[in-house]
Image: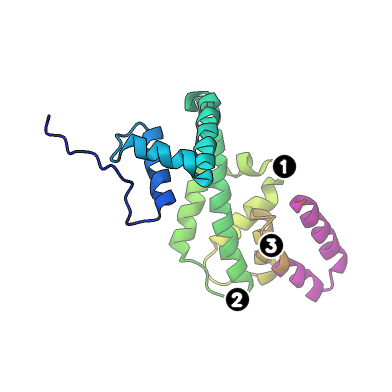
Amino acid sequence: MNGAAPRSTRVAPSVGLCESVQWHVCRMAAGLPLRVSGTALARHVRECRACDSFVDELGAVRRWLAACPRPSALARDPGDVAPRARRALARELMARLARDLLALGRGQEARPLADRLRDVQRLDGLGGPRWWAGEQYRPWQAAIELVVQPGPVNRDAALEGASWLDPLGLDIALAWLGCLERTGRSDLARRLADRLLCGLT
């Protein structure tokens, strides 16, 4: 004997037999050493329809995985990653600032001014408002100026600014639509609702 522990001639009886067999089959498929008798496993698989089907399915999965492109082939062009990451971060920052304006527009307390200023600085470091907003630079910039304004703000302007920073945020859109309806601007509210529905579809 070479000191190795002798294999059991039975599959572990302490758990469901089929569950144990399938667990050992998975270990074997992963290239791990068997802890039970291979003969006992094979006998059970031949006699058990459920385990026989399991082995067939496992084989199909292994063949499918072998045919998949390698991870390196699926990786994006590194030159494409940085702009996408910057835009994703900018969207997150704008959404946070939009919630600050939403709170201010509802007469609630927003995040501390220092936190808002820090997010605006981060946005500026990612390329600045002209790059993020494009043709919508002016209202976007007005919203940014409003979110870092110390003291009370115009509530209607705050809700409108929030809608510029996060145009598809449903909580923001509903608050802004309600404001428009309350202030007699139903036509604008309908146009905004149509724009929102188009953006969602």
Label 2 crowd bin: few (<14), some (14–19), many (20+), radius 10 Å: some
Label 1 crowd bin: few (<14), some (14–19), many (20+), radius 10 Å: few
Q: What label sits on residue 135 in the rendered view?
A: 1
Q: Using the image, determine if residue 94 lies above or below residue 128.
A: below
Q: Which residue is mark 2?
A: 107
Could you tell me which secondary element the residue under label 2 belongs to?
loop
Q: What label sits on residue 170 in the rendered view?
A: 3
Of the two numbered discs 3 and 1 in the rendering, the one whose residue sits closer to the viewer: 3
Q: CA distance from mark 1 to mark 2?
A: 30 Å
195 falls in the magenta region: yes
| Residue 183 placement (x, y as % from top left) | 80, 74
Mark closer to the chain start, 2 or 3 = 2
Mark closer to the chain start, 3 or 1 = 1
Q: Using the image, determine if residue 48 lies above or below residue 177.
A: above
Q: Nearer the viewer, residue 189 or 184?
A: 189
Q: Nearer the viewer, residue 12 or 117?
A: 12
155 horizontally vs 197: left or right: left
State the extent of the magenta-drawn residues as a range: 175-200
Q: Are marks 2 and 3 in contact (CB under 8 Å)?
A: no
Q: Are marks 3 and 1 in contact (CB under 8 Å)?
A: no
Mark closer to the chain start, 1 or 2 = 2
